[in-house]
Image (tube, grey):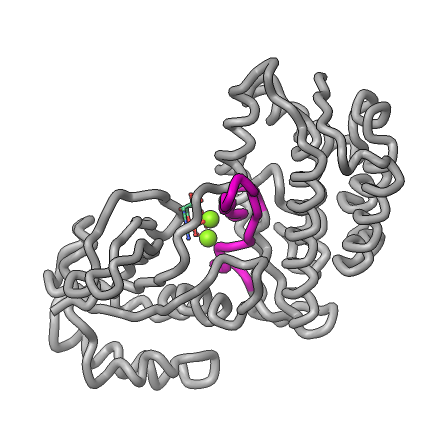
Amino acid sequence: ISRFEKDFIKGQCIGQGGFGKVYQCESRIDKQSYAIKVIRMRSDDIKTLEKQLSECRNHAQFNSPNFVRYHDAWLELDSCSGSLSESDNSGQSITSWNSDLLTANEENLNDANVSINRVAENSELKMHILYIKMELCNSTLDKYLERRMDLGSNATINIRVNRRFINSLLSAIEFLHRKDIVHRDIKPSNIFVNSQDGRDTILLGDFGLARKIQGQALPDDMEPLASSMLSSNVGTFLYAAPELSSKKYTKSVDIYSAGIVIYELFIIFKTGHERVAMLKELRETGVPSREFNQHFAVWAPIITSMISKSADKRPTASKLVTECEAAFWTEKLSIKNIRKEY
Ligand code: ATP
Ligand code: MG
Ligand code: MG
């Protein structure tokens, strides 16, 4: 019997990404709500399994207030063999052979492949389902910014909130980079928002593309992110450092993405179309708009340095934590609510 079915009541689908769906679920045991990410893949596709497992293996290491809290992950084998159906809740727990699978990594991939083939011979095409159980967050930064935009002329840029968001985002990146991990997918839909006592805080999540890097050079398996993936989805493309589609990139790709996110925090766009146009312009020119410069003179050079086309000119996360805090003090805006219109 499926552990997912046995222990959880599946609620609504709260998100969908490239590989899986995320459901709001209630535990039958502790009665609390969780977000459970459900990723389905062919059981003979060991490469994909390995990639998906790296998501929870990375996430499990990040026990810090600036990250979405990770709880648990487990694998199930879909019992309706041979079917590529969309049903996520017909699973059967993996038994004896799963230990081969779970120890699969670069070195013993071949052994694991053998064990997978053995399974595949005995059965028709089966599906693996990876469940990742984590804290249920209230929202994401993209929804938050959309809601702010929808307020139209009533929208305000709350400098105090921006200060908290920027500090949390940069601290999260600093934490990862200190552990030599590059996130590679920093964008508003992967930044989560929690609201408690009328106070919004942000957390970094979605470690699907996070990888360990050695020093400044990326290991050979660090394939360039497919340009098709980067160009097909404007929500991803707008934040991706230009060099991500090549083989040579470093931790500084995360700084580039964070620079675009920070720019966006200071602007209330009139429409989604204007947002895309202005972020594209920022990417192309490499400098914030003239209006932005006038209103946020202290922030313009910081953003310019973060999105520099020469990756080695971008500041480190730890330097930015200090620089951004100083910027808030310089502008003495930290206690005022202001509205800016462009
Ligand atoms: P991507 O295409 O960005 O790689 P993905 O398949 O990796 O997407 P996530 O980004 O982890 O999936 O989740 C997709 C969406 O589901 C999020 O943007 C968010 O809206 C929702 N979501 C995911 N995890 C949570 C959570 N812990 N709490 C609340 N909502 C969540
Ligand atoms: Mg995501
Ligand atoms: Mg992802």
Find residue 164 and report its horizontal and vertical position in percent: 67, 46
Q: Is residue 66 visible?
A: yes
Is 192 within the magenta? yes
Left or right of 122 on screen, residue 65: right
Q: Position of residue 280 (x, y in %)?
A: 66, 30
Taking the view exactly as shown, the residue that stands out farthest to the top is 153
Examine the rendering and report whether any part of residue 300 can be seen: no
- Residues drawn in magenta: 187-210
Screen quadrant of the C terminus = top right
101 vs 23: above or below = below
The quadrant in which residue 286 appears is top right
> What residue is rendered at 60% in x and 21% in y?
155
Q: Residue furthest front?
A: 197
- Between 233 and 96, the one lying in front of the other is 96
Q: Look at the picture and state if 309 lies above or below 278.
A: below
Residue drawn where x is 33% and y is 82% of the image: 112
Query: Is residue 62 rendered magenta in the image?
Result: no
